[in-house]
Image (tube, grey):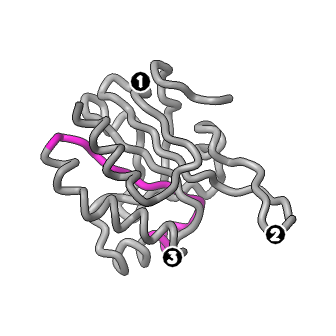
C-alpha cells in the first residue's frame, strides 16, 4: 500500500526513551514523521543532524518532528545523546509502523537483496491527514524542502 497526500495517516504507537509515542499525541499539531534505516550510520546521522539544526524553525512554526527506525530504545537513546537531538526517536521494534507506512521494502546492495527501511518522510496535518510524502529521500536539501512545505 502506498500512502498519498489526502489519506489518513496510519495510527501508530512507538516506544521511546520517554514513553510511548502515539499519533493521537500530536492531534491539532503538524507532525514530520521521518523514517531512517539505522542509528549511527553516516546518512542517518547526517539526516538527524539536519533535522536537529532546523528544529528551532520547525518548533517556531508549531511543527513536531519524530524520527523512526527499527533500532531499540537503548540504541535511540545513545544516538540522541551523541547527536544532541532535541526531538524523540521512535523504536519500531516489531516493524508494525514501518509496514503500515509502506517503508519496509526490498533493497539491493552489491547484488544482494534484503529488506530494510526506505528513507522516507511524511508530513501529517493536525487533523491526522497526510499532507506530503517524500520517498527514496536523498539527505542533502531534504530537511529544507520539508520545512518549506510544512510552513506554506
Query: Gap in Å between the C-alphas at discs 1 and 2?
Result: 38 Å
Q: Which residue does the numbered mark 1 point to in the structure image?
A: 129
Q: Position of residue 55 (x, y in %)?
A: 24, 56
| In-image side of 152 versus 146 (left or right) | left
Could you say which disc has been placed on residue 110 in the image? 2
Q: CA distance from mark 3 to mark 2?
A: 21 Å
Q: Which residues are magenta?
A: 61-76
Q: Locate residue 41 relative to residue 55 in the image: left or right.
A: right
| Helix, strand or loop status at disc 2 | loop
Residue 36 vertical placement versus 125 (above, below): below
> Outermost residue toward the top?
6
- Residue behind mark 3: 40
Q: Could you classify mark 3 by the number of other residues whose Cα lies within 10 Å: few (under 14), some (14-19), or many (20 or more)? A: some
Given residues 74 and 148, the one toward you in this image is: 148
Looking at the rendered image, the quarter that the N terminus falls into is top right
Question: At 33% from the left edge and 50% from the top edge, which residue is drawn?
Answer: 65
Q: Is residue 71 above or below residue 21?
A: below
Crowd around label 2: few <14 · some 14–19 · many ≥20 (10 Å) = few
The first of marks 3 and 1 along the sequence is: 3
Amino acid at each position: 500500500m502506498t500512502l498519498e497526500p489526502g489519506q489518513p495517516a496510519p495510527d501508530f504507537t512507538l516506544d521511546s526513551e520517554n514513553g510511548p509515542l502515539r499519533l493521537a499525541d500530536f492531534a491539532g499539531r503538524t507532525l514530520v514523521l521521518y523514517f531512517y534505516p539505522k542509528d549511527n550510520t553516516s546518512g542517518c546521522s547526517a539526516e538527524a543532524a539536519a533535522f536537529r539544526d532546523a528544529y528551532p524553525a520547525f518548533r517556531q512554526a508549531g511543527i513536531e518532528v519524530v524520527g523512526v527506525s527499527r533500532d531499540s530504545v537503548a540504541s535511540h537513546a545513545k544516538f540522541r545523546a551523541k547527536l544532541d537531538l532535541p526531538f524523540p526517536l521512535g523504536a519500531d521494534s516489531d516493524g508494525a509502523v514501518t509496514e503500515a507506512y509502506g517503508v519496509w521494502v526490498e533493497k539491493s546492495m552489491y547484488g544482494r537483496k534484503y529488506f530494510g527501511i526506505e528513507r522516507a518522510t511524511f508530513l501529517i496535518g493536525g487533523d491526522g491527514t497526510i499532507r506530503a510524502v517524500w520517498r527514496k529521500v536523498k539527505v542533502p536539501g531534504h530537511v529544507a524542502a520539508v520545512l518549506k512545505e510544512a510552513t506554506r
